[in-house]
Every structure is written in structure tokens, then in C-alpha cells.
Image (tube, grey):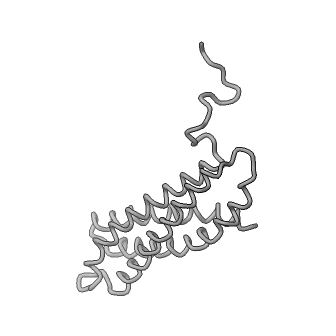
Amino acid sequence: MNQTHIHLLLNHVAILGAIFSFILLLAGSVFGQVVLRKSALFGLVFSAIVAVPVFLTGEPAEEAVEHLPGVTESAIHEHEEAGEAAIWVIGVTGIVSAITLFLGIGPAGKGRRLLVLVYLLAVMSSVSLARTGWLGGKIRHSEISSAAPANVAGEQDDD
């Protein structure tokens, strides 16, 4: 396994971890379950930790694909810019989630007030990471690129 494989594998973990953690955080609030909210906070910390190797393997992944047919510098650049923003957002989310866990979110916990900030950061992280992943997919997946041909190979026009 090389750094490109690590980049491709772990990016899904970070993205889905943030999204599912946000959903779990909402469920914990709707059902009044502290354990669900704590699990969500752990999930956000985990997603932030996993995002670090994803970010660090981005450059080697770029070097592996930048000269392949159909890969454009603009697609790579967009993905890279989005990744730079996303690593900061998920990093802050992970730190604030860890502090919230440390302070406690039970009835007497001092971290309860931070939950509002965590909600906001979790939404921002989920959107930012999902957008970064989508832009990364456009590098090698022509089926999601806006420049994709109108019909797939083997299909015929009905004219």
C-alpha cells in the first residue's frame, strides 16, 4: 500500500465519520441521550485525527496522478484548495469536541454551552469534507465531472 492508497482509503473515513457524527449528535439531542452526544463528539475527534494523514498524503497522491491522461491541473488545484480549508475546519471541530468531552456534557457539565458551537462546526466540517471529496472524485471520475460526455460509451443517440 502506498501513500495514494492511504489517501483514497482514509478520506472516506474522515468524510463519513464527520457526517455520521453530526447525525448522531442530532439524534442525541432529539432523544435527550447524553451517550449519543458523547459518541458523536468522539466521532468528530476521530474524524479530525484521520483527516491529518489524508491531508499529508495529498501531495504524493497528486504526484501519482498529475501526468495521467484526462487529469487536469485545474481539478487537482480545486481539490487541493478545498482540502486546505477542510483540514482547518475539521481540526477546529475535533479540538472543540475534545474540550467539550473533557468539560462534560451531562446535566452539570460545563461543556454543554460548547455544544452549540460543535453543532455549527460539525455542519461546516461535513459540508467542507464532502465538497473536498467530491472535487477529488472529479479528478479521475469523469462521470461526476461537468465536462463528462452527454452519452456513455456504447449508448446511441435516439435522433
Spot the residue most to the top. 159
Please tell me in which quadrant of the rendered image residue 9 appears: bottom right
The residue lying at 33 percent from left, 86 percent from top is 103
Task: Give the mark count.
Answer: 0
* x and y percentages locating residue 125 in the rendered image: 43, 64
The residue lying at 47 percent from left, 74 percent from top is 91
Q: Is residue 102 left or right of residue 46?
A: left
| 91 relative to 156, above or below | below
> Camera-side residue: 29 or 82?
82
The residue lying at 55 percent from left, 56 percent from top is 133
| 34 relative to 65, above or below | below
Location of the C terminus by quadrant is top right
* x and y percentages locating residue 102 in the rendered image: 37, 86
* x and y percentages locating residue 81 in the rendered image: 53, 61
Q: Is residue 152 left or right of residue 127?
A: right
* x and y percentages locating residue 100 in the rendered image: 35, 81
Q: Is residue 129 left or right of residue 105?
A: right
Location of the N terminus by quadrant is bottom right
The residue lying at 63 percent from left, 50 percent from top is 139
> Camera-side residue: 73 or 117?
73
| 96 relative to 51, above or below | below
> Camera-side residue: 71 or 8?
71
